Image (tube, rainbow, N blue to C red):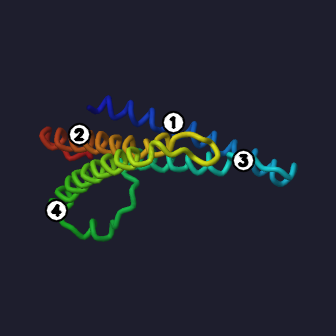
Amino acid sequence: MEKLCKILYKIAGYVAGILLSIMMLVLVVQVFRRRVLGSSLTFAEELIRFLEIWLVMLGASLCVVDDTHPTVTIFFQLFPEKVRKVVKYLVYILLMAVGVVIIVSGILLIMKNYRQTTPTLRISYAWVYVAIPISGLLIDIQSLGILTKMLKNRKEGGEKS
């Protein structure tokens, strides 16, 4: 499970990096064309918006692994050590539940809008919205991987996660 999580993390990171690079390139070309040449790319704003959706959704799964989701640490630090460990398990279980909700919601959104095409790019909205269930699946896999690692470390006698 740990190996799968590492591979998925790397893939998501690389894809996010590529999407960010494309987004920045299109943005620079768009600004240049608008300010210098006086005409803008017709598809730029829509493409950037869709790439941003993908970046946010992939980034959410990366944040699970990096433990960088926003948290209220002041309350967490007030808990005794044993309570903190239990809360940490609960957080990842809740993240998995949220991941399931994201998957189901994303699939329903795709099913509702797959026949519609985007105004400028003329692609199915399904290609935009598929980022949602993919993100939910990645969140679930990464959360399960972290929980598995935490339980393994607990059995071995050390709480290293």
Q: Which sits in the foreground, 63 or 78? A: 63
**Residue at left offset 25%, top offset 70%:** 78
Q: Are marks 3 and 2 in contact (CB under 8 Å)?
A: no
Q: CA distance from mark 1 to mark 3?
A: 25 Å
Q: Return the disc, 1 or 3, that comes first in the chain's sequence.
A: 1
Q: CA distance from mark 3 to mark 2?
A: 48 Å
Q: Which sits in the foreground, 9 or 139? A: 139
Question: Which residue in the protein does label 3 denote?
Answer: 42
Residue 57 in percent (x, y) is at 44, 48
Numbered marks: total: 4
- Residue 15 got which mark? 1
Question: Which residue in the protein does label 2 denote?
Answer: 149
Helix, strand, or loop for circle 3?
loop
Mark 1 neighbour class, 10 Å CA radius: few under 14, some 14 to 19, many 20 or more: some
**Residue at left offset 33%, top offset 66%:** 73
Question: Which residue in the protein does label 4 denote?
Answer: 83
> As shown in the figure, which amino acid type bears the numbered disc 3?
Thr
Helix, strand, or loop for circle 2?
helix
Q: Which sits in the foreground, 106 or 22? A: 106
Q: Return the disc, 4 or 1, that comes first in the chain's sequence.
A: 1
> As shown in the figure, which amino acid type bears the numbered disc 4?
Val
Q: Which sits in the foreground, 78 or 60? A: 60
- Quarter holding the N terminus is top left
Side (left or right) of 56 relative to 101: right
Q: Return the disc, 1 or 2, that comes first in the chain's sequence.
A: 1
